[in-house]
Image (cartoon, rainbow, N blue to C red):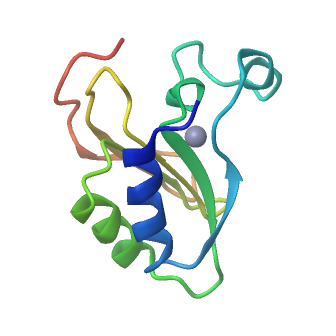
Amino acid sequence: MLNLDFCKKLNDFLGIVPASISSFYRTVERNQAVGGSSNSAHLHGVAADLILDTGVNIESAIWHAKDLKFHGIEYDSRNRHLHLDDHPSGRIWHVIIKPDGMQLSIDRWKSEQV
Ligand SMILES: [Zn+2]
């Protein structure tokens, strides 16, 4: 089921940052098929995976995501993939995966992971 608050934030984000949605709400079966974690926010309809358009400035995109108060922000620079979520656990995490696969944590986990 989709979450209207999350949809509103995603709508606001996409009004600023041009991107395509590659994944949103997932059923348990779909989540397993794509290798998602068993407690994925996608299962709750509060996560979206985006492919940023060519030319989008990633620092600006992440700034907008933080400004909109998405709880989970993960950007993989290898494929311009941006995951945004509002996990129901309330966990806050921001990660950038660099071209060499190393992870750069912007903020520490601020609440317990579930
Ligand atoms: Zn995702």
Q: Position of residue 50 (x, y in %)?
A: 61, 59
Please report the residue visible at 80 percent of the width from the left and 17 percent of the height from the top: 29
75 w.r.t. 92: above or below? below
Q: Quadrant of the N terminus?
A: top right
Q: Is residue 73 visible?
A: no
Q: Position of residue 95 (x, y in %)?
A: 38, 46
Q: Quadrant of the C terminus?
A: top left
Please report the residue visible at 37 percent of the width from the left and 47 percent of the height from the top: 5
Quarter location, residue 18: bottom right
Q: Is residue 76 visible?
A: yes
45 w.r.t. 10: above or below? above
Q: Nearer the viewer, residue 9 or 112?
A: 9
Please report the residue visible at 47 percent of the width from the left and 52 percent of the height from the top: 7
58 w.r.t. 109: above or below? below
Q: Is residue 106 left or right of residue 55?
A: left
Q: Is residue 24 left or right of residue 97?
A: right
